[in-house]
Image: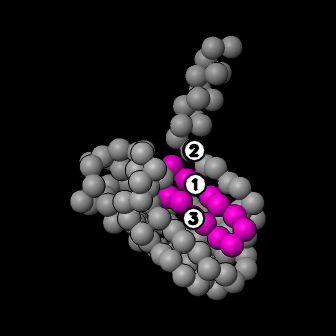
Amino acid sequence: MKKVKLISLILFSLFFIISVNAEEFICLPYPNPFNPDARLTVNIAEDSEYKITVMNLLGEEVKQLHTGYLGKGKHEFQIEMGEFSSGVYFINMQGRSGLQIIKINLLK
């Protein structure tokens, strides 16, 4: 029983995702963990204004990937983190009616 809980905790910590009313978009970072660059693929279900940022563990915005209009469909963004130290960061994507936060790991 304890092994199952530990494995569940490890999987949760590896693939941490929070979604609130985020049916309008899906974010997928690859690779994760990464060093020092990753690609973020975003599938948008409806045209709208979107903000995509990278935050540190304190919730501070450390990098802005996009702010503004995105049309329906697939979009790709490059996450360049060469100037940052190794650690856990979060991609925060906000749409008109939804929010998605995804954990990413920078390994150097």
Q: Amino acid at mark 3?
A: Met
Residue, disc 2: 16
| Alpha-carbon span between mark 3 and mark 2 | 14 Å
Q: Amino acid at mark 2?
A: Phe
Reading the chain from its start, which is encountered first: label 3 or label 1? Answer: 3
Q: Main secondary structure of the magenta part?
A: strand
Reading the chain from its start, which is encountered first: label 3 or label 2? Answer: 2
Q: Amino acid at mark 1?
A: Ile
Answer yes or no: is residue 104 visible.
no
Judge left or right: residue 31 versus residue 50.
left
Judge left or right: residue 84 versus residue 30.
left
In the image, residue 22 above or below residue 2 = below
State the residue at coordinates (65%, 21%): 4
Label pair 2/1, CB-CB below 8 angstroms: yes
The residue stretch that appears in magenta: 91-103
State the residue at coordinates (73%, 80%): 46
Residue, disc 1: 101
State the residue at coordinates (42%, 45%): 58
Label pair 3/1, CB-CB below 8 angstroms: yes
Toward the left, the furthest residue is 83
Number of the front mark, 3 or 2? 3
| Alpha-carbon span between mark 2 and mark 1 | 8 Å
